[in-house]
Amino acid sequence: MQKRATFRNLWLASAFIAPQLLLVFVFFYWPTAQAAYWAVTLEPAFGGGNQFVGLENFRAVFADANYWASVGASLLFAVGCTAVAVGAALVLALFADRGLRGHRLYRFTFFLPYAVPAAAVGLTFRFIFSPDAGLLAGINHVVPGLWNPALDGNDAFVLVLLGQSWKMIGYNFVFLLAALQNLPRTTIEAAAMDGAGVLRRMWDLQVPLLTPTLFFLLMVNITDSFVDSFALIDVTTHGGPARATMLMVYKIYLDGFESKDYSLAAAQSMVLMALIIGLTVIQFRVVERRVHYR
Amino acid sequence: MSDIAIRGVRKSYGRIETVHGLDLAFGAGEFVVILGPSGCGKSTLLRMIAGLESITAGEIAIGGRVVNRLEPRERGCAMVFQNYALYPHMTVAENIGYALKVAGVPKAERLRRIAEVGRSIGLDGLLDRRPAQLSGGQRQRVAMGRAIIREPKVFLFDEPLSNLDATLRVQMRIEIRRLHDRQGVTSVFVTHDQTEAMTLADRLVVLNAGRVEQVGTPEEVYHRPASRFVAGFVGSPPMNVVDATAAGPDTVTFGGLQLTVPPHGLERGARLAVGFRPEDAVPTAQAAPDGPVAAIDLVEDLGALRLLRGRLGGADVVVQTAAGTRHGRGPLPLQIAPSAIHLFDAETGLRLAPRAVRAAAA
Amino acid sequence: MIERTPLVNLLTHLVLVGGLLVLLLPVYVVVVAASHDLVAVNQVPMPLLPGHHLWENLAVAWQKGNFRNVMLTSVIVAGLVAAGKVGLSAISAYSIVYFDYRLRMVFFWIIFATLMLPLEVRIVPTYAVAANALEPFQALFDLSGLSVTLPRWNLLNSYSGLVLPLVATATGTFLYRQFFMTIPDELAEAAKMDGAGAFRFFKDVILPLSVTNMAALGTIMFVYAWNQYLWPLLVVTDQNYATASMELGRLVPSAYGEAPVWNTAMAGTLIVMAPPLAVVVVLQRWFVRGLVAVEK
């Protein structure tokens, strides 16, 4: 954690750290404090200072069935996206790592979706899954009305879930492949000498040794599905139909900017923040323990 | 236990050939050490025997069966890797027993054999540990155990001792040799350390730049090196080699000095290299006329012996003397018995055999 | 390794080709849809091969989305974020790693903890700050009882507003910190023996060593900034500062269900996704390296 050779030039040290501290204060800590303040106060209808109301805002949020619906949707979304994106990336990485003909092409292509802006992902998937044009519309010709994300909440949910997963597969693939290639080659060779075939080695050796990376990706994917899904929702479903895709972050945005209810939005922000902090803390706890294998 | 036959084996990576047609035969139960500097192709050869590396040309047969196309698991070889290659997420017992598990050996049988092997290599009480909790020597034992439990036809060792400290290296070296003497399994051991090679081998294969320099017992390789390369590589410190010219059928000269050698039928004026071991150069009080005199400029005291370093006939030479001798810097007249002198062709670097020996052999 | 595993190899190829198709399919669909006229694109099933109207649609979308302005803004913003981030993170990480002062670890954790506070979560108050960036300081002065009146500094509809909050994040600082920790101590000691001070060591040793890291971070931040959607949507109301990614949302009717003009919408999508894809394709090595380095 600490360098043996350090410098003593305090002026330079302060000058170098100051800009980031200022930015972090203005754009991270102040707004967070502000959110905390709003979360426990209420703005009176006829002006004047904010009035302290304790946990009243939280009580209002928690009493709202819509809120719990959005929490449920977010959790389902997180679990679904993570399972699809990490699972698919794991399979692809394990096979790409075999280095058969064409593996360079795969390595090069698989992570490209991650570079696509979420808004573009949203529009693309909206077209592909549109009920009356695009790739899936054919279904409706066979069975009319079977697929319509504009009307059916489940369809809409699947649409955004696949969009988010598609984007994250490439990201996960990069990490998993890098981790696989860092595994000592002789360990794999030893297993081959011990008689384990390709698939057996994947299951007995490579997957267990990837655990730290898998865990890291699990956390990143969950967090990303919580926060980064905003653009995707905004260009596809707007949280609908019938709130089926109303994820927490989108609800906060709507409550804050459309309904201008800062207090409720702030209370929800605090909950989401707590969730993300919790995930990060868990991640660090486990990451510290991973020294174990090495 | 199986014999191994290597016939015309070559290895290329793309256009670059690193192993140039090796022909070797290892007897069943033999302990063969492949010795050579790094990059000489020794590990590649071992990995080709194991099936970890494909064979570009030629063939390898184990126990009379050509294995070129066989997978590693079908060849009946077990291997100990330089970095041990233990499975970090498995316990010692799981590491040792993995091959049996893959082979579908029932659990009870497996546990029995793991315990047995654990006892035989001194890992009792450590079977539940993970590799990360073991010392270097213990990891080395686990790697050995993993190889032993499969009761292989051939043991392959890829520089298994080079990650250990000096004391442990000697200890493990002895254990490996004892293990071999007990079990009698054909073993191929790759190393760049000539002490390891000399002490372990029934037979040594000296490899250089993808070619065999010499095959023989350690004694043969030490006392009758087949080439200038072997002479300079085997022995610690290695043999002194000085460029020289033939002055007669049994005389050579270098730097104005003369040396009598056994009859080689030398042609006058032929260019050669003269070799002698540091311990075969004996300092004398009285220099023979035109006899070799080394200019000593450094004395290294190793306790049991002293090394006198200097120049002779334009080459760096080392003279080894017993401890307690009082030779210092300055000119040092040497006496070298003709029988202790090795001659090599200056062009090919190959050993020139003395006439008498050749006549006796014929 | 010698392995005769035709079945597993076949499976491998099937899985990988399948993955390739699934991952590329959406991009392909965009290209196909962007190259047909309105009638063709709305056919069911949609045409599977590209048509002949690509340039025409791109031109229409370019016009409709005001992409001449918007792309320029995005390039400026993404460039500024990348440059700002590369510079800012380098110096702050240097301060944290190479100096020994009491608040070092406190600052480290202050910056580090921001990783747990994504913009999307504190969006409303951050917007409030953007309306007057000096407000936090004003509030601090008010609290401390000093009667100082700072001017207002409105970041809405400005490059500063688009750039600064994105530059503030901690990811880059971490990348550099991890990298600095791998630089051997002996290097700093040697520099000290040679008489170099903190600044010289930074300029003559650390910066040249960091070039790869800078390229990696720059690539990542460029793409990250380009792809931002929510923040520009909030701080920009003036068309002159609209970014490409946010502008994309306006190419389709917001009400779900109404049939959009898909061919030009997909042409717009293509335009917006092209620059980050190009950056990643060209600078792939650095992008991947930077991405993976952040983990450790």
Image (cartoon, rainbow, N blue to C red):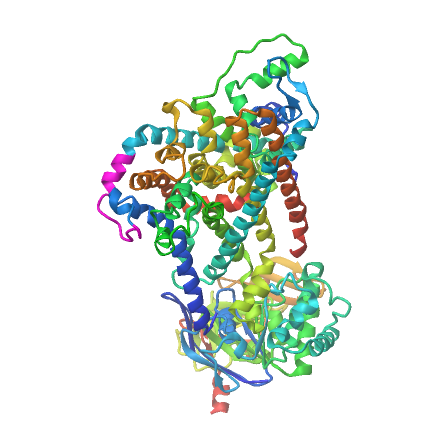
> In the rendered image, which quarter is residue A268 located in?
top right
Q: Is residue C201 visible?
A: no
Name the residue furthest top. C147
- Coordinates of residue B358 in the picture (x, y in percent): 48, 87
Above or below, A34 relative to C25: above
Q: Of A181 and A138, which appears nearest the observer?
A: A138
Identified at 25% across, 44% down, the residue is: C39
Above or below, C201 relative to C44: above
State which region is magenta. C44-61
Identified at 64% across, 17% down, the residue is: A50
Identified at 36% across, 56% down, the residue is: A142
Q: Give the side of residue C168 with respect to residue B166, left or right.
A: left
Does the magenta segment cover residue C242?
no
Above or below, B292 relative to C221: below
- Coordinates of residue A186 in the picture (x, y in percent): 55, 64
- Coordinates of residue A166 in the picture (x, y in percent): 45, 49
Q: Give the side of residue A217 with respect to residue B270, left or right.
A: right
> In the rendered image, which quarter is residue C14 located in?
bottom left
Name the residue furthest front. A144
Above or below, A248 relative to C80: below
Does the magenta segment cover residue C52?
yes
Name the residue furthest right. B125
Q: Give the side of residue B305 with respect to residue B257, left or right.
A: right
Name the quarter where the C terminus of chain A is drawn. bottom right
Name the quarter where the N terminus of chain A is drawn. top right
- Coordinates of residue B337 in the picture (x, y in percent): 58, 76
Identified at 56% across, 43% down, the residue is: A73
